[in-house]
Image (tube, rainbow, N blue to C red):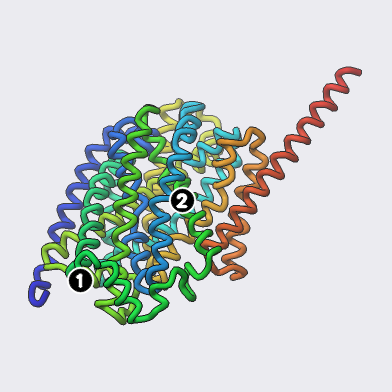
Amino acid sequence: MGNETSWLLPLIALMLVGYFALTTWLGKKGKAHSESMKGFAIAKGKVNPAVVGMSFGASYASANLFLGVPGWAYTYGLSTLWYTIGCFGVTWLGLLLFTKTFWRYGQKNGGSLTIPQWLGNRYHSKALRVLVALLVLFNIYYIVGQNVGLATMFETVIGIPYLWGIAIGVIITVVYVSLGGAFAQIVSDGIQGATMAVVSLLLFISLLWTIGGGWNVFGTLQAELRAIDPALVSPLSTGGPFYSGFAILSIQWLLFSFVLLPHLMNKVLTVEKEEDLRTFTLSAGVSLFTLSIFSVFAGLAARIILPGLSSADSAIPAYIMEAFPVVIVALLVMGLISAILSTTDSLYLGITNSIGNDLFKVLAVPVLYKNKNLTEQELDAKVLKASKVSLVFIGLVSLYMSINRPESLALLTNFGTSAIISGIAAPISLGYFWKHANKSGAIASVVSGAGCYMTLTGTGIIEHVFQAMFFSSILGFTSMITVSLLAETLRKREKTSQEAVRGL
């Protein structure tokens, strides 16, 4: 781009100011809907279900799909397509299977605001609610991954120091989420999702002039990759996440279960009417397809035209600098920033809602306000304040944890989500379909599934994150079934004994 790059920093700075102004305006607009914990957490019925669906896809996409996964493609080649295809097909299948029943259960007992509360209501257990809320804190790793992705983008494209990039992302997100809660988060994500869809399509279309080949662009791409290294066109990769059929199966299980993550399933609770779920799932499916499939090809193309990058996660930023004029680069950078922030704000909201609604309300309120006879409005105000205060705290913690750049952004983002899935997959799914599911089994599943995952990854017994999650999830299902049946048998025996005593 030659001397045109001198215009890049001012353009992006101007767009960032505009972005911050837009999100702040949305935050102020959403403030009217965020005066209660319910409004702050889910903005129920305040946003069009089609926008909520687009927000679902935008929250799903993140730095992982736009930076981390293309970085895998740069390193491991075509085998990465196992991940991107699963992101649309397998995840959307999970959404279609879980949405309606999850929504219906969420309306009971006055309505659920979070996944921990949903599980607590489903199994009538405050202990389970607290355990899952603690597990949700693992999403801090996902936030750190977004911070790293944003800092990598700024550093690669316009030379902003790594730490400054992290600080910019944290400040922008914390400000508008604290102002407007779920309303600001969902609407801004809907706008960002549309921007990200345009970016995805542009990255894909750019192969026509960066790789060439016309209608045979895929053939040309494959031939160029094979010329570099035949392993890049193999369906399996040596040393990467896709090294065996079982590893790929583990990844598909992750992607199927991914829909259960708190920052995504909370979107379902936002929909007010059951008939609107159809619009929501259709919009989410279109969004998932557009945002999941196309950007990975730019990572493959970067391996051809930009060999020898020091960091694979910088493949997309480096590629757009090579492939587009400066004005388009600025627009693409803003689209990629949108991909990162649209997930970050959902994660912040999910964690802080759980801290306020499920930890502070259940554990701290009974102790701090034991004899004060708080009204429902007073209690709600205190829980809301706790959530907003924790938002600043989580922002600072994520900033600190992001200082040291990880080796793989994609693996970091999937570490925390895999821990959560290992614990909650069985209680949520069996809670739908199995009449014997009970709180004893659910608690055993959360403890054994998440505990097994942390043990396997912490000790290095299984270093492959996805396989550790797969085995831990299986243990979670096994524990829940076994303990649920045992608890049910014990209750029946106790009931029989009591009836026998009364008969005497």
| Whether residue 306 is visible | yes
Question: In which image quadrant can residue 482 be found?
Answer: top right
Question: In which image quadrant can residue 276 be found?
Answer: top left
- Residue 275 position (above or below residue 295): above
Q: Tell me the residue at 38%/71% (across/down).
A: 77
The residue tagged with tag 2: helix, strand or loop?
Answer: helix
- Residue 58 position (above or below residue 50): below
Residue 287 x, y percent position in the rendering: 31, 47
Q: Tell me the residue at 47%/26% (across/down).
A: 110
- Label 1 neighbourhood size at 10 Å, few (<14), some (14-19), many (20+)? some
Q: Tell me the residue at 24%/67% (across/down).
A: 216
Q: Nearer the viewer, residue 41 or 313?
A: 313
Q: Nearer the viewer, mark 1 or mark 2?
A: 1
Amino acid type at circle 2 is Phe
Residue 334 x, y percent position in the rendering: 20, 58
The residue tagged with tag 1: helix, strand or loop?
Answer: loop
Residue 159 x, y percent position in the rendering: 21, 73
The quadrant of the rendering that contains the N terminus is bottom left
Question: In which image quadrant can residue 180 be found?
Answer: top left
Q: Nearer the viewer, residue 478 or 160?
A: 478
Q: Tell me the residue at 15%/67% (across/down).
A: 324
Whichever of callouts 1 and 2 sits on the residue coming sooner in the sequence is 1
Q: CA distance from mark 1 to mark 2?
A: 36 Å
Is there a contact, CB below 8 Å, between mark 1 and mark 2? no
Amino acid type at circle 1 is Gly
Q: Nearer the viewer, residue 332 or 30?
A: 332
The quadrant of the rendering that contains the C terminus is top right
> Which residue is tagged 1?
212
Determine which of the numbered discs, if any, sits on residue 387 in the image. none
> Which residue is tagged 2?
258
- Label 2 neighbourhood size at 10 Å, few (<14), some (14-19), many (20+)? many
